[in-house]
Amino acid sequence: MTTAPHDSYVERLTAALAGAGFAPPVAEALAGFDQENYQFIRRVRKGDIPKALIEGLGVEVEPMQFHALAAVTRIASGFGRDGPGEVTVGHLAEDLMVDASRASRLASDLVDRGFLRRAVSQQDGRRSVLEATEAGQALIERFLAAKWERTIRLFRDWPEEDILTFARLFRRYGEGMREQYPSG
């Protein structure tokens, strides 16, 4: 992509996509998708989405603490993974993409607040694992109910065919992203 000082990123991207053989409307659509995807990722990384839901629940927990609690329940249940597993601080750090000391502090904060407990690994008695307490599980359940309440409102007026197409294409996009950007 050659750039002129007055060209915007979107104009350069659209031109590059057109140069790669995409028809102008498709190139514009992909550039628009890039912008929307960026805004979505930014909102997730900043914690806007969980923060809005947590505030609605009236629970005083920081977004990163909530991310840690959610990560523990995801890892333990196998959601988005190959299967369920025990949760170590190392697993938590990997899931949150933070160093082990940060993950350890988050876990300690959640233990102190009664959302997590430390237990002995059933696979290796020398290892400590993290488990959600009843309070932690209840918070996750309330969060998911609030999330799905909003998600249902979001999709309520969409035609069924649009929802099915969106879900199919988003899954296809995710598969392509994993292929193009394999995890280490």
Image (cartoon, rainbow, N blue to C red):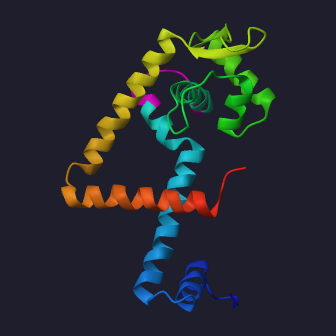
Residue found at x 35% / y 31%: 146
Residue 77: x and y, percent? 51, 26
Residue 150: x and y, percent? 32, 40
Q: Residue furthest front?
A: 123
Residue found at x 59% / y 61%: 179
Is residue 162 inside the magenta stretch? no
Placement of the N terminus among the 4 image quadrants: bottom right
Query: Considering only vertical position in the picture, is 158 above or below 21?
Result: above
Span colored in magenta:
54-63
- Tell me: 126 left or right of 152: right
Q: Evaluate whether residue 119 shows in this view.
A: yes
- Tell me: 23 left or right of 145: right
| Towards the viewer: 4 or 22 | 22
Query: Considering only vertical position in the picture, is 52 above or below 4?
Result: above
Residue found at x 51% / y 16%: 136
Query: Considering only vertical position in the picture, is 178 above or below 105?
Result: below
Identify the image quadrant of residue 56: top left
Residue 157: x and y, percent? 19, 53
